[in-house]
Image: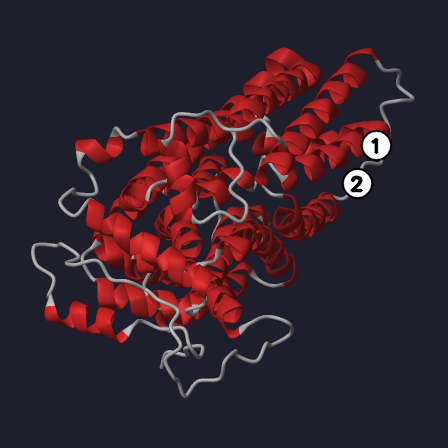
Amino acid sequence: MLVQSKGHHLSSAATFAAAQHPVKDGSLGPQVTISASNHKSNEPAKSAPVCGLSIYALRQALAASGPVVATISSGMTSGFSAVLLPQLKAADSELPITEDDMSWIASMAALPMALGCLAGGFGMERLGRKRTNLLLCIPFIAGWLLLATAQNVALLLVARFLTGLAVGILGPVGLIYIGETSAPQYRGVLLAAVSLAVSTGILLSHLLGALLHWRLAAALCTLAPLIALILVLVCPESPAWLASHGRPTEAQDSFRWLRGADPEAAAELQTLMHKQQQRPGEDCGSKGRLTRASFVKPFILMNIFFVIQQFSGVNAVAFYTVDIFQQTLGSGGVDKYVAMGVLDIARLVMSLVTCVLLRRLGRRPLALVSAAGTGGCLLILASLLRFGSSADLRWTPVGLLVGYMCFVSIGLVPLPWVMTGEVFPAAVRGIGSGATSCLGFLVFFAVVKSGPAMFATLGSDGTFAIYGLVAAFGGVYLYFFCPETKNKTLQEIEDAFERKPAVSTKV
């Protein structure tokens, strides 16, 4: 049942007009006018706030919760091999594996992620955002159940492939659904919750794997996609997708359930409906859509942003942090599980901090501070490893690595994913986000694959210096080309890219 605020609803004339002009050939028919009239309503003038939030803010959080909980399963997929492989290597393992098996089990989840991004991008345009979010829960659930019951290595690989495929599909779909169902003032924090969910999933998988047998841990991991499935079921389809597919009445109902009908929301809905009427005959993959500045500019921006993100070394450093800690702390070293736990907690805390900062500061300041801090920490670390004395090489590098993780986590890690859900035009949002996310995973492969060779040939100092320079020069690029999307509607962001003036360099 839709909850409507008093005095804010579709005018009776607009409703009558929509009923008298059925949709034909995918057209949206006559323009529907959203008004804030003084018509009487049985609903209260304002919904009672819950914990200081309106009922509509809570509904937007509910809509975001499905993809966010599913993303916890993505984090579990990424972190599970770290606890699965040690148990499989143990002398008393019920499923013995070889060194070659280990590499395949670890990498199999990442293998289909790029393909999943493309499938998710095209699927959400044809099937809808909600339906695609529902479908991706199936390989997640099947993969975890198969992993929990696998009797040989082949089944382990199939299980990892299924969960990795689901991660790839979720990449663009979850972000777009959250972006299209949330108001500008909440969109940043809800999209940042995706990064928080990844950190939570990694921490949970490591915790479960450290305390439980890997089969039981895998079985418990099925809970996340099951809960996500239920949460997505109770929420509406994206209003933008419905409007772009010639279903204006459903688009209005969905929008009003999520956002209400106050004047600001009504004006945004009016703009959304009007824009779709202006382009009724173009297919989402038509050449005209893909050659517009509103698509080309954000497509180039986000691809470069993902390259900066990955080549700042975030995943390479995460993969080899334990070894670095053990080297710098001397022969005593640190327990690898303790180091892993410290990093997991630090990642989680910074993800929480990022949710707050995005609401208060916006995208540009975080991007610039993150790039500068990341580059600075890595370049100082590289200099210290190259020229520092043995006394310096004990705790200072550890502090610099912690500082690096803090800086990279507030901007370069979450922002490409956050902005992927914001910057593409509605009609090609699925294609744009899918292709961009696909590149992100491909670059991830390149960085992680090249990491050992770089450390072996260039040394730790040379490798960190290259990562630091990429982050620093990336900051310069983002200063000139990264837009501020905070508190802007998706249509305003699209219009800004369509216009000729360059993005303001105001921080």
Q: Is residue 24 left or right of residue 181?
A: left
Residue 141: name its quadrant: bottom left
Residue named by callout 1: 329
At label 1, counting other C-alpha atoms closer than 10 Å, the crowd grade (few under 14, some 14-19, many 20 or more) is some
Asked if the residue at tag 2 contacts the one at tag 1, i.e. Cβ–Cβ closer than 8 Å, the answer is: yes
> Callout 2, which amino acid?
Val
- The residues bearing labels 1 and 2 have C-alpha atoms spaced at a distance of 7 Å
The mark nearer the N terminus, 1 or 2, is: 1
Q: Is residue 213 left or right of residue 4?
A: right
- Local secondary structure at mark 2: loop
Report helix, strand or loop for mark 1. Answer: loop
Q: Nearer the viewer, residue 437 or 262?
A: 262
User: Residue 211 appears at what percent x and percent y?
Assistant: 65, 62
Rendering coords of residue 379 (x, y %) = 72, 19
Left/right of residue 301 with respect to residue 463 in the rendered view: left
Residue 382 spot, x, y in % from top left: 73, 18
The amino acid marked with disc number 1 is Leu
